[in-house]
Every structure is written in C-alpha cells, then in structure tokens.
Amino acid sequence: MENLSIIIRAAISTDVQYATTITAEMESSAMARGTGIAKRSSDYIAQKIAEGKAVIALTPDGNWVGFCYIEAWGHDGFVANSGLIVAPAYRKSGVAKKIKEKIFQLSREKYPAAKIFGLTTGLAVMKINSDLGYEPVTYSELTDDDQFWAGCKSCVNYDILMSKDRKNCMCTAMLYDPKDHYEPAETAEEFKKQSKTFERFMRIKQSKLIKYLKRSQKNEGRKKLLHYFFNF
C-alpha cells in the first residue's frame, strides 16, 4: 500500500485517544503470531504519549496507522524502542521502517548517551534495526534493570526466559551503542549477507529452547510426584 501521505511524527497529548486501539492491536498481533510480547495497558500507552516518548503514524484524516514508544532503564543508560505495531491494512508497506527510523531519532535526541536496544522474534525487525546500526548481542549486554525484565511476565515465553536465568530466550537481542558502533550502511550490508544464516539460527534457537522448556517441565513434574509419594 502506498504510504507517501501517511504522517509519522512524535506523539502529542491529544493522541491519547488512540491508546485503546493501539493496545488492542498489540495483543491481537501477538496472538496471531503465537509469539511473546510484553503486554501494556492503554493507560501505560497513554502515559508514554503524554510524556512525548512515542511516535505515531496517522492518515491525513486521522485514522491510526502505527505506533512505537520509548522506555528508559538503568538510570537512562539504556533505552528500548518498544511496542512497534502497524495496523493490518498498512503492513508490508514500509511504514514500520519509517516509524522505527523516527523513534530511533527521537531516542537519540532525548537520550544521546544511552545504548538503544531491542528484543525481537521477527527477521523483518532485525533488518530494520540493522539498517539503523544495531548489532546482534548476547542478553548480558542489555540492561540488568529488574523492572525491564519484569515487563516480560506477560509474554508467553516468560518461563523460558526465567529457566535460562535471563541469559537467553526466543527473542534476538540487538544493540546500538553510540560510543562503539558500526555505521548503518555497514550493519545493513552485513545483515544482507547473513540474513539466511540469521533466519536459520533463529529457527534452531527457538526449537532448542522449546525442547529445553518441555524437558524442564517434565523433570519438574517428576520431582513433584516423588515429593508427593515420599511426604504423603
């Protein structure tokens, strides 16, 4: 779909009217994909809009198209561009990339010294991040702020995250470090070369983590059964 007429800008206070629509689409999208997403309430989204820490996409006549918001962690040392969502009718139109570019720019303006990171299960988002200069990293390079990780509790994969001591999960971690990073053209070119490898790696990683969780759950079930018999 043509998106030249779509307005993509920093959200303003009057945009809180779209908060309920945004959260509903976030939940619907996560269920359709069968992947995890940290659930956010409409009040939380409205707060981000009111604080000027969000980007919104609208048609000229005011129909909602897309959204993304900023979260800061670790005393503003880390910033996450979270909750990227695009209305179904506008997906695969290039809107998501433009929203990511705008929220990245806004993050750099508000938190120029912060490391910007993201967690994603989607190859398309990985490509967009790479075009901005993000690089794949281990979870240990992300914020250790407990509040950030607590936001994953509503994710369907939270058990996997905790079983791996927050060191790994279904998502791929990506990071932009303003003090130490490649130029976007370099990371984009590298992603282009390695995209098939990334895709294969993500499939293998997710398969192994699911097997690990099932095995852990099975062992936990055996422990509970033994405990019941020996302490009856």
Image (spheres, grey):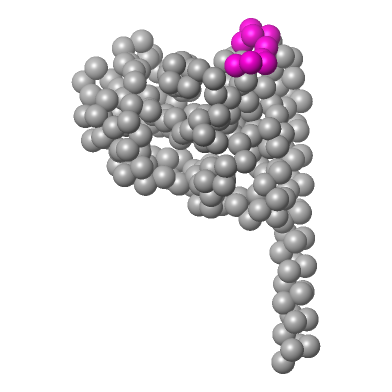
The residue at the point 61 percent across, 21 percent down is 176
Query: Residue 96 location, x and y as percent?
Result: 46, 23
Q: Is residue 62 visible?
A: yes
Query: Residue 223 location, x and y as percent?
Result: 76, 74
**Compared to 220, does 143 lie above or below?**
above
Q: Quadrant of residue 78?
A: top right
Q: Quadrant of residue 24?
A: top left
Q: Residue 217 versus residue 166: which sits nearer the camera? A: 166
The residue at the point 38 percent across, 28 percent down is 53
**Compared to 143, does 114 lie above or below?**
above
Query: In the orientation shown, which residue stands out farthest toward the bottom?
Result: 232
The residue at the point 77 percent across, 47 percent down is 208
As drawn, is 186 to the left or to the right of 69? Answer: right
In the image, which residues are magenta? 178-186
The image shows a total of numbered marks equal to 0
The residue at the point 60 percent across, 16 percent down is 178
**Compared to 77, does 40 lie above or below?**
below
Magenta span dominant secondary structure:
loop
**Compared to 83, does 183 lie above or below?**
above
Assign the C terminus to one quadrant of the image. Answer: bottom right
Q: Quadrant of residue 189?
A: top right
Query: Residue 47 location, x and y as percent?
Result: 32, 38
In magenta segment, residue 181: yes
Q: Residue 74 versus residue 37: which sits nearer the camera? A: 74
Assign the N terminus to one quadrant of the image. Answer: top left
In magenta segment, residue 169: no
Q: Is residue 126 visible?
A: no
Query: Residue 44 location, x and y as percent?
Result: 36, 42
Q: Residue 192 versus residue 107: which sits nearer the camera? A: 107
Query: In the orientation shown, which residue stands out farthest toward the front?
Result: 75
